[in-house]
Amino acid sequence: MPKSPLSRATWALTVIAAGALLVGCSGSVSVGSSDPKLSKAKLADTVAAKLASTTGQPKPDITCPEDLVGKVGTTTRCKLTASDGSTLGVTVKVSSVDGKQINFDIKADETPTPAQS
């Protein structure tokens, strides 16, 4: 039985997920407050830029629900949304903190969630 072709957006999400999992993305950001914290907007932009550079794809649409606190082991879940509405979860985990610099790892889920009708 022939399989239906993947949509272009789903294919892009699959490539991003595979690239992020194989390469093992990580990021690093310096913040200016006494308690290291990265705003959700800056986190989303940093994750999108890192995924784009790692996969060679255009910068994806990423949203993050909360600021990232600079404490080793802290995690948050961001969401990558493709043009067709399908999504891919992205886990961000703080790996180390050096003064005001937060270092974190990025891992995309293996399977995208189809767009809701």
Image: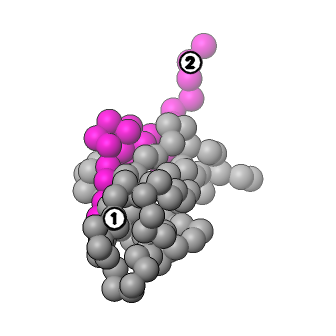
Query: SS for tag 2?
Result: loop
Q: Which residue lies furthest to the top in this view?
A: 1
Taking the spot 40% from the left edge, 76% from the top edge, the residue there is 36
Question: What residue did someone put label 1 on?
Answer: 97
| Mark 2 or 1, nearer chain start | 2
- Kindly identify the amino acid type of the residue bearing the numbered disc 2: Pro
Query: SS for tag 1?
Result: strand
Q: Can see residue 66?
A: yes
Q: Position of 48 compared to 82: left or right?
A: left
Range of the magenta residues? Answer: 1-28
- Kindly identify the amino acid type of the residue bearing the numbered disc 1: Val
The numbered disc on residue 16 is none
Question: What residue did someone put label 2 on?
Answer: 2
Q: Can see residue 83?
A: no
Magenta span contains residue 3: yes
- Viewer-proximal residue, 84 or 103? 103
